[in-house]
Image (cartoon, rainbow, N blue to C red):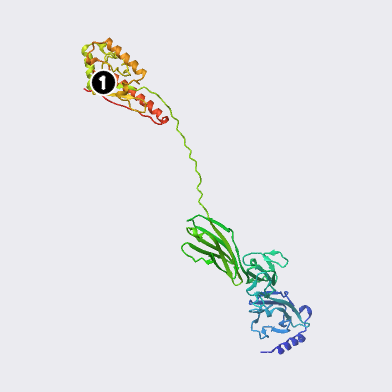
Amino acid sequence: MQNKDELLEDIREDTVVNAIPEKDLPKFGELLQNVTVPVSREAILQCVVDNLQTYKIAWLRVDTQTILTIQNHVITKNHRMSITHAEKRAWILRIRDVKESDKGWYMCQINTDPMKSQVGYLDVVVPPDILDYPTSTDMVIREGSNVTLKCAATGSPTPTITWRREGGELIPLPNGAEAVAFNGSFLTIAKVNRLNMGAYLCIASNGIPPTVSKRVMLIVHFPPMIWIQNQLVGAALTQNITLECQSEAYPKSINYWMKNDTIIVPGERFVPETFESGYKITMRLTIFEVDIQDFGAYRCVAKNSLGDTDGAIKLYRKYWHIPQTTTMTTMAPTVSINTVPVVLVKYNKEQRYGSSGNQNANGNSNNNPYNFNPGSGQQSTKLQRGKANNKGLDQASSGLNNVFVGATSSLWNSQDHHSSSSSRGRDHHQQQHQQQQQQQPNLGSDHSASYRSDGKSPHPVKHDAKSLTDDLDRMQDLKGWASCLAPYLPILTLPMVLGAWPG
């Protein structure tokens, strides 16, 4: 195999011996293109030559003046490079697993006299990479101090650095303003406070994926502080009550409750609780079934390595409030009605038919005091209302049962009917009844029409079925009238005494 010097000598000899007119000399068929390739990929450089004849092609590295290949031979000792010849006019230089050091100018040369050549640029791009140093690590600083966060990255092209907060909070800028993002390798925060505490992201990007970032924690130390929303709390005896304090501290504080300079120990009636959220702590003390000795001053205490603080809450006794109630009484309207009792005589079946038989036997319709003849179709007269005179009547009370209908508050009895308080209407009917007895002195005991409201009658009185039916209809009418008045009367009594003459 020929070495590099022998190959170059052959090229010179060919140039001298083969003197060819210019128009017949080889020429480049295409321009050599610039190539950009990511690191670790393969780079391909192609040189197209027409009418090469017996001339030769060589690839060189311009910046180092290194011959890489001549014709189909690889001159360099770099095993990542190779040469191929395609379609008898294209000479292709391949560089595998490109490194950033491979970046630069490459020349395709023809050994004519004078030599013909063209160059192309190989650009090797490198994704960003954040350096561990001098990039800041997690930082701890006292509240009120100044701090500077640093971020360094490499890549090709040179990456840009952007700072953001992990939770999307605003970043304080050196000019006093605030922004969501800050561009630059150095982020300076003046007079740091607890609100600036948290995670900051250093993001490096250069358009070549992937974009990379690094998380830097900024920890701010400060002594405890306590806020109390309600410093005066009232509770009644046996009531459950909760006292609450808000605390902030970093490093995290120790929190507890005190009463009368004594630490409250958790128990059945006293239950202390803490709820943490970052550097914020909520303290709660629940007292079950408050007793008289529970009233007084309570203190919530917070301590850490930088200091301690406390807050006071006073628990006072509160009395139950009983609201006054107003009672309203509505009286229903009352109606006063005076009614006259109605006396209805009722007979049993045997008496009814017996009376009718006696009338037919005598054949004298005038003997009927009610002027009713079943055969003549005449309508029966209504039963007389009232009360028979007490004079001339015996004391036998077992032969007659009376019916009384009235809207009174007490029952009518036989003594009420022959008392001096009987109504004028009843006296009027009694006079009419006495006149009828005088006009018909000779009537038999079976045809007597006199009756008494107290049930004392010297003779049994007999009625026909028609007359009894009419009186029952009147009684039903009076019942209906009484039921209509029932919604309007607070007390409604319908005394009814039903009876029949003995057989």
Q: Is residue 485 left or right of residue 453?
A: right
Question: Which residue is the extreme one toward the top?
Answer: 439
Image quadrant in which you'd find residue 71: bottom right
Q: Is residue 365 left or right of residue 203?
A: left
Q: Taking the image as drawn, is residue 58 in sight?
A: no
Task: Give how far across and how far down residue 257 sits, in percent.
Answer: 54, 65
Q: Taking the image as drawn, is residue 102 in sight?
A: yes
Which residue, given by chain and number where applicable, does mark 1 sit on?
456
Image quadrant in which you'd find residue 473: top left
Count of numbered circles on the image: 1
Closer-to-camera residue (366/96): 366
Classify 10 Å Cα crowding around label 1: few (below 14), some (14-19), many (20 and above). Answer: many
Task: Give how far across and how far down residue 195 sits, in percent.
Answer: 64, 66
Closer-to-camera residue (174/273): 273
Task: Give the SS element for disc 1.
Answer: loop
Which amino acid type is shown beneath numbered disc 1? Lys
Q: Which corner quadrant holds the N terminus?
A: bottom right
Q: Is residue 495 left or right of residue 282?
A: left
Closer-to-camera residue (384/95): 384
Q: Residue at x 46, y 63 (%)?
A: 268
Image quadrant in which you'd find residue 139: bottom right
Q: Residue at x 50, y 41 (%)?
A: 326
Task: Give how far across and how far down residue 274 sits, in percent.
Answer: 53, 65
Task: Give how far across and how far down residue 266 sits, in percent.
Answer: 49, 65
Q: Which corner quadrant holds the C terminus?
A: top left
In the rendered view, would you say 497 is above or below 77?
Answer: above
